Amino acid sequence: MFRLKRFINNNSSSLNLFNNSIQHVKYSTSSSSFNNLLLNDDGNEIKSNSSYSSLFLTNKGKNTDFKLNDQFIEEYRKKKAKFGFGILGEIVYRRTYSRVKPDTNTNEKWYETVERVVNGTYNMQKRWIESHGLSWNDTKAQSSAQEMYRKIFEMKFLPPGRGLWAMGSPITEKKGLYAALNNCAFVSTMDMKDNPTKPFIFLMDASMLGVGVGFDCRGANSFIIKGQSKRNCGDEMFIIPDSREGWVQSVQILLDSYFLNKPKPQFDYSKIRKKGEPIKGFGGVCSGYQPLQELHYDISNILDESTGKPISITNIVDLMNLIGKCVVSGSVRQSAEIAFGDPNSTEYINLKNYKANPHRQAFGWTSNNSVFAEIGMEYDKICERIIENGEPGFAFLENMKSYSRMIPSEKDFKDSKALGGNPCLEQTLESYELCCLVETFPNNHDSLEEYLSTLKYAFLYSKTVTLGATQWPDTNRVLLRNRRIGCSMSGIAQFIQEKGLNELREWCLKGYDYVTELDNIYSDWLAIPKSIKKTSIKPSGTVSLLAGATPGMHYPISEYYIRRIRIHKGSDLLPELKHAGYHIEEALDNVNNMVVEIPIHSGKNIRSANSISIWEQLSLAAFLQKHWADNQVSSTVSFNPATEGPQLKHALNYFQYQLKGVSFLPNTDLNSKTIYTQMPYEPIDEEKYKELTKNLKPVSFENSRPTEPEPDKYCDSNNCTVLSQPNNLNNLE
């Protein structure tokens, strides 16, 4: 990625990602007005003499001295991490979060990952405190950091996947890309008439950092698509830099040509590294220029056909979805999108009706689609669509704006400026707002007192992330004001099974009160506003696997099941797994992958998802929205289309007053014993589990070659993440 290192005098205009002053820019590289010094993904300096103004603000982190005590870290060097679900948690860790150490060219061990994350967290605090002339106490910081280390090492709480991967790495320490620590965002198209390109390039830039983005269709019909100018642009050419920013710039240039009646741009893709070459800074390998070239082609096709017409709902969602498809092409990056629309709009509701919109089948899968449900609306017709394909979901925006927790005393209208939410709908968000989620595991604690102690450090981590400025001025403005975070729980099904619903209620109530107290303390210490909202229930996924917890509020498919994961054929993890006795076979859907079968025990006597009615699932979501989450509860309710489908409209009539959002998933296999080849989850019984595990040996990955981790999904959830193909939604790949 490139970052400008140019000095601007006092009379110069500040660079702005969404500036309209680029209308008369020429894309020539033959004669430049200034030279920019850039840093690429690998951190090496490269020259660019393009006169096209940079879209991004510099945000370089400073060197700091905070470091966990070496003697303290030495205590954990030989300790074995207790990853969850047998070997599954460790595989996920090594594949996704264990970075290559530049000094030894070996992958991190768990104790080193935790050290990096904690050092990065306290460095952010120290930079903030000292840059604002406040008091920093090294002794207190060391004691606090050591306790946070213990909590993470023992998986009492975990930062989000984004944090485990990026915090304390060159991404934050050298490049200052603190946006990469956040899980999700939302952008509204409401004001796009003033700057039509702005929402699209925000979504693309955020998605390429792994941030999931929600968007709405409010800008439909707000301006006419002018089309490209017929003026001859001569030999003007934009040489696309080999960087995230370069890709985003090219899309802005193309969109501006249609929205602002500029000449058709010419693109040179020669600087983009070839397909398969490594991306050291962000992990993974390059997809080559083809996905970007295809995106340019698709954008031109859509906007050529729409020239002279008002921008439509379909135009907005098509462009956002095509950008998402480009971002995930080749499985290089992972992202997520959610579209929000009017429940009374036939055009919006039919976006995933591929009989009516056959052109959308190639990319319509890149977003979950939800409606802004109005309290008291008729649900009949939409429920018919849900029974058919599970969409749309529901966002009760009135409740989102009006309430913290869904109790009468907290109808406080704190979020009166909110316009939407994130892709998994556990966070209420304003336009251009980001949020950081952190995950606690109540069932990994022996007492409420121990859990409250964990909440202190989980909250401190997420509050610290709000100190990091992003490259987006609009985002910084909202972040500085709201400081929104989402302190979440996972393993709720396990907790209910072991300790009961009444004890969960007590932990929620006392935990929320303590989080509120912590917000007062830490906001005062950092001299920043209190967080507008603080708690949520995220759907989780890979992070909960590390800790051996069921995801969010959801129940497992079965007490015992086989979890199949896909690993690249060249991975050094495979020989060790084979030696330990795990069944491995070639993936039928991708010849470059192998499928590993891992027997899982979810918890003694835990109920299966298929045994929980829609009414109980909705009741649990409402319970958590009332007692814990002042943001939202991410709830995907599975249902039997035949027996429970007709009940959906009635259930929504009751729960529209108790929830802020909900989605539904038709489970067509509830009454079927059909076993699909290499299905990600396969229920088994205890006898089969014992048979599969009796000959398994311990696994050691100590001798594996260094491998850069694959960047995690923005929210590490299987429920809302966009991958390279729609049929891979339940895979870890």
Image (cartoon, helix red, strand yellow):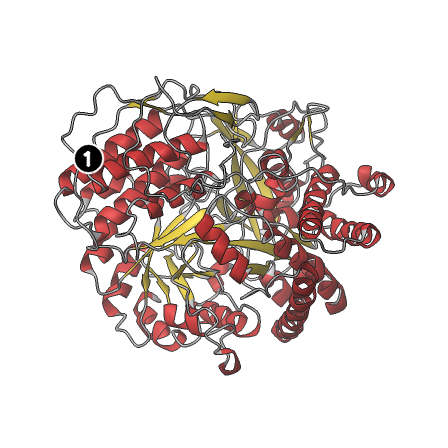
List x then y, in percent, for residue 168.
Answer: 66, 40
List x then y, in percent, for residue 95.
Answer: 59, 34
Q: In which quarter of the image is residue 722?
A: top left
Q: Vertical placement of 239 versus 698: above or below?
A: above
Horizontal side of 551 relative to 330 (left or right) equals right
Mark 1 sits on what residue?
Answer: 301
Q: Vertical placement of 621 versus 466: above or below?
A: below
| Mark 1 Cα shell of 10 Å, populated few (<14), some (14-19), many (≥20) | few
Residue at 32% over, 37% down: 22
Q: For the view shown, which residue lies furthest in the front direction?
A: 11
Residue at 72% over, 66% down: 452
List x then y, in percent, for residue 515.
Answer: 65, 67
Q: In which quarter of the image is residue 604?
A: bottom right
Q: Is residue 37 visible?
A: yes
Residue at 73% over, 41% down: 115
Residue at 28% over, 70% down: 379
Q: Which of 546 and 45 is in front in this view?
A: 45
